[in-house]
Image (spheres, grey):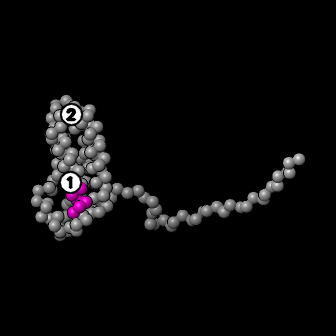
């Protein structure tokens, strides 16, 4: 049960982060032009927030704390978007600050819970290839420094 809860939370958080990244410019353009908060609030809507508390009981305390940190940061963003009277430029600056905090909370969440499983059953991982398993590791090509002969200085005369 805990593995399924972790995956649902990871999928929800990944979806929110993808929407924030892909809609960032457009949601502020709409906020500026229409003075509507809906694009901002819909972007950060959580799909699995309802009823999640009962399922969080199945997670260890440390994982619960990490999930709470992520959704608490998301809630700060939601609160700001719901009640701000800031102009679009200021709202965008404040969003950038909140988004950085949310990205950090998301990074910790993924490290703690693991990345979500994709529809094809593979784990979604944001990684960089350091070494391929099918190729042998590179040879150690450390160069040894040869000792240079010391030259004597002429005595001052």
The answer, for residue 135, to whether it is visible in the render is: yes
- Asked if residue 2 lies in the magenta stretch, the reply is no
Q: Is residue 113 above or below residue 76?
A: below
Q: Is residue 34 above or below residue 62?
A: above
Label of residue 90 in the image:
none
Q: Is residue 143 above or below residue 43?
A: below
> Of all residues shown, which one is farthest toward the right?
157
Tell me the mark number nearer the camera, choosing from 2 and 1: 2
Quadrant housing residue 13? bottom left
The answer, for residue 29, to whether it is visible in the render is: no
- What residue sits right under mark 2 in the picture? 86
Q: Residue at x 24, y 56 (%)?
A: 69
Crowdedness near tag 2: few (<14), some (14–19) or many (≥20) residues, C-alpha within 10 Å: few
Q: Residues in magenta? A: 64-69
Viewer-proximal residue among 129 and 34: 34
Q: Secondary structure at mark 2?
A: loop
Quadrant housing residue 148? bottom right
Q: Residue at x 21, y 45 (%)?
A: 77
- Asked if residue 66 lies in the magenta stretch, the reply is yes
- What residue sits right under mark 1 in the picture? 71
Label located before the other in sequence (2 or 1): 1
- Find residue 154 and report its horizontal and vertical position in percent: 85, 51
Q: Residue at x 82, y 52 (%)?
A: 153
């Amino acid at each position: 049960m805990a593995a399924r809860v972790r995956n649902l939370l990871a999928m929800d958080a990944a979806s929110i982060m993808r929407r924030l990244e892909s809609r960032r410019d457009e949601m502020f353009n709409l906020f500026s032009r229409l003075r509507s908060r809906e694009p901002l609030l819909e972007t950060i809507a959580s799909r699995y927030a309802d009823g999640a508390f009962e399922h969080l009981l199945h997670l260890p305390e440390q994982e619960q704390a990490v999930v709470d940190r992520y959704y608490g940061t998301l809630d700060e963003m939601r609160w700001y978007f719901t009640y701000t009277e800031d102009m679009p430029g200021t709202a965008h600056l404040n969003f950038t600050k909140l988004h950085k905090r949310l990205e950090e909370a998301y990074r910790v969440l993924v490290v703690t819970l693991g990345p979500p499983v994709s529809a094809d059953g593979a784990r979604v991982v944001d990684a960089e290839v350091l070494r391929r398993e099918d190729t042998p590791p590179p040879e150690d090509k450390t160069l040894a420094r040869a000792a240079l002969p010391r030259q004597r200085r002429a005595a001052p005369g």
